[in-house]
Image: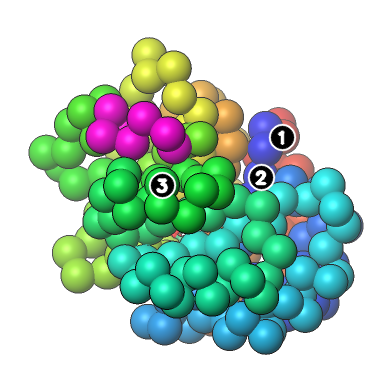
Amino acid sequence: MQVKICGITNSEDAGDAVAAGADALGLVFYAGSPRCVTAEQAAAIAKAVPPFVTLVGLFVNADSAGVEDTLARVPLNLLQFHGTESAEYCEQFRRPYIKALRMKDDLDVLAAMAEHPAARGFLLDAYRPGVPGGTGESFDWQRVPQDSGQQIVLAGGLTPGNVARAVDTAQPQAVDVSGGVEASPGRKDPQKVAAFIRAANG
Ligand SMILES: O=C(O)c1ccccc1N[C@@H]1O[C@H](COP(=O)(O)O)[C@@H](O)[C@H]1O
């Protein structure tokens, strides 16, 4: 099971997550988040990350120039678009990307995936009106399609205590967590991070 620890705000938390076995670290470039980092902070964190750990930049309906500016300053391996971005928008950066889908009750998941043929995968997160993500809420894992042929990253309200059940139910390729492994908003708890990665890997 691949594990992404999202909402890293400092080099110490990055190092702890890598030491615990994280495959990917997420940096949030969304001003509305308590985990938001500047490009300068992100570049400093990136220096603490080994080359074979994927560094993911998370954006929410950001203006294109802002994304380009971040890309020029931070060595991101993968982009995560967590808003209502179109395929045309996401593809303009010519970088590998995953698209977040918020699992609103009436969302046609396969149809939403078909709108992003160039996406490298889809991150499925809980839906809460007015909040783009990082809600700490989960959704019905049985709604994760088993026949999409896509790389699925399961997210939303995952914790060290529920991730094994989530993996068993949804059978994703990867899991993603933010609030469930925090000591306080924006600071990770290294013991929770390690427990999460252990539990995700069964
Ligand atoms: O982490 C955030 O603050 C955030 C803000 C805006 C959009 C997405 C955000 N995070 C992503 O949401 C998932 C789920 O978060 P949680 O585990 O429920 O707290 C997280 O893994 C990020 O990919």
Q: Earlier in the sequence, mark 2 or mark 3?
A: 2
Q: Mark 1 points at which residue?
A: 201
The answer to whether residue 163 is left or right of residue 125 is right
- In the image, residue 20 above or below residue 182: above
Q: Earlier in the sequence, mark 1 or mark 3?
A: 3
The answer to whether residue 93 is left or right of residue 83 is right
The answer to whether residue 173 is left or right of residue 155 is right
Indicate the quadrant containing the N terminus: top left, top right, bottom left or bottom right: top right
Q: Name the residue under label 2.
A: 3
Examine the rendering and report whether any part of residue 78 can be seen: yes
Marks 1/3 in contact by CB < 8 Å: the verdict is: no
Which x, y percent locates residue 9?
Answer: 65, 78
| Residue interval drawn in magenta | 113-119
Judged from the image, the secondary structure of the residue bearing numbered disc 1 is loop
Can you tell which of label 2 and label 3 is closer to the viewer? 3
Which x, y percent locates residue 68?
Answer: 51, 69
In the rendered image, which quarter is residue 11 located in?
Answer: bottom right
In the rendered image, which quarter is residue 114 located in?
Answer: top left
Q: Earlier in the sequence, mark 2 or mark 1?
A: 2
Which x, y percent locates residue 89?
Answer: 33, 54
Marks 2/1 in contact by CB < 8 Å: the verdict is: yes
Residue at (77%, 80%) from the top-left corner?
44
Looking at the rendered structure, the kind of residue marked 3 is Glu
Extreme residue in the top direction: 147
- In the image, residue 99 above or below residue 36: above
Can you tell which of label 1 and label 3 is closer to the viewer? 3
